[in-house]
Amino acid sequence: MALAKERKQELVEKFGKDDKDTGSTEVQIALLTERINHLTEHFKIHKKDFGGRRGLLKLVGRRRNLLSYLRKRNLEGYRALIKELGLRK
């Protein structure tokens, strides 16, 4: 299921440079994280949804690639983003 329009706009405003900045790396990572969290809850109920699980793994891989790109380009921004999203412990 896609993100609600209001929730997506909140994430864009929070992580983007302005309210129309949907393409920056930080915003893309935040949107992917929101979708991953939603799908994780879905799989707690629907344990045999293997097609959806494949999609989840693709999302996780895409987020990992974006995170490594951000780490190379902007280390401080990377650290702030993972702290804000709660990705690492």
Image (tube, rainbow, N blue to C red):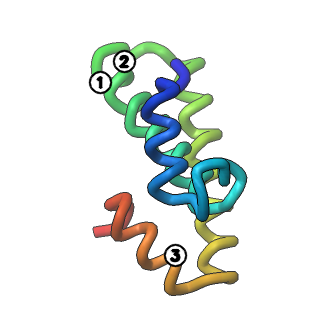
- Callouts 2 and 3 close, C-beta under 8 Å: no
Question: Residue visible at 37% across and 58% down?
Answer: 85
Q: Is residue 51 left or right of residue 10?
A: right
Label 2, on which residue? 47
Q: Looking at the rendering, which quadrant does residue 64 occupy? A: bottom right
| Label 1 crowd (10 A; few <14 / some 14-19 / many >=20) | few
Question: Residue visible at 32% across and 28% down?
Answer: 41
Q: Amino acid at mark 1?
A: Lys
- Residues at marks 2 and 1, CA–CA distance in whole angstroms: 6 Å
Instruction: Mark yes or no: residue 61 visible.
Output: no
Please state the horizontal and vertical placement of residue 6, each as a whole percent of the image. Answer: 45, 30
Q: Nearer the viewer, mark 2 or mark 1?
A: 1
| Of callouts 3 and 1, the N-terminal one | 1
Compared to 37, does 86 lie above or below?
below
Question: Residue visible at 42% across and 75% down?
Answer: 80
Label 3, on which residue? 78
SS at mark 2 in the image:
loop
Q: Is residue 28 left or right of residue 85?
A: right
Which numbered marker is on residue 69? none
Label 1, on which residue? 44
Q: Amino acid at mark 2?
A: Lys
Q: Residue furthest front?
A: 19
- Callouts 2 and 1 close, C-beta under 8 Å: yes
- Residues at marks 2 and 3, CA–CA distance in whole angstroms: 33 Å
Q: Amino acid at mark 3?
A: Tyr
